[in-house]
Amino acid sequence: MSTLEIKNELHKFIDNGDEKFVKIFYKMAKVYLEQTQKDKMISEGEEDIKEGRTYDLKDSRKMIGNWKEK
């Protein structure tokens, strides 16, 4: 089944689902997307560390201080 076919079938499930189904489906999709974003951030952070793109504590505190001022 192609991605487009799956999307169309999911739309049918949502259109025909009761309130409980739609809420559960929404929560599941939201959790999945949030976790995907977190996984991406972790991966990017690990790559930064691997490439030596890190900051010492002094520079980190300075950056955080700048965030608080905005």
Image (cartoon, rainbow, N blue to C red):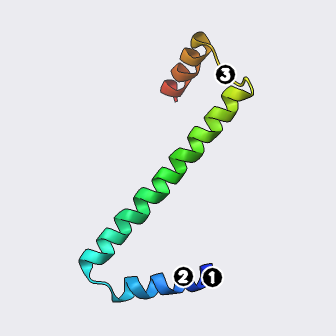
- Distance from disc 3 to disc 2, alpha carbons, whole Å, reads 42 Å
- Distance from disc 2 to disc 1, alpha carbons, whole Å, reads 6 Å
User: On the rendered image, what quadrant is the N terminus found in?
Assistant: bottom right
Circle 2 residue: 6
- Vertical placement of 12 versus 34: above or below? below
| In the image: residue 19, left or right of residue 47 | left
Circle 3 residue: 54
- The residue drawn where x is 63% and y is 82% is 2
User: Percent from the top left, x then y, of residue 10?
Assistant: 46, 81
Mark nearer the viewer, 1 or 3: 1
Q: Quadrant of residue 24?
A: bottom left
Residue reaching furthest right?
Answer: 51
Asked if the residue under mark 1 is in contact with the one under mark 2, i.e. CB atoms within 8 Å, the reply is: yes
Query: Which one is earlier in the sequence, the residue at label 1 or at label 3?
Result: 1
User: Percent from the top left, x then y, of residue 68?
Assistant: 48, 25
- Vertical placement of 61 versus 46: above or below? above
- Vertical placement of 26 versus 9: above or below? above
Q: What numbered label is drawn on residue 2? A: 1
Q: Amino acid at mark 3?
A: Thr
| In the image: residue 58, left or right of residue 17 | right
> Few, some or many C-alpha atoms within 10 Å of disc 2 (few <14, some 14-19, many ≥20)?
few
User: Percent from the top left, x then y, of residue 41?
Assistant: 58, 42
Q: Amino acid at mark 2?
A: Ile
Q: Secondary structure at mark 3?
A: loop
- The residue drawn where x is 73% and y is 23% is 52
- The residue drawn where x is 37% and y is 68% is 26
Q: What numbered label is drawn on residue 61? A: none
Q: Quadrant of residue 53?
A: top right
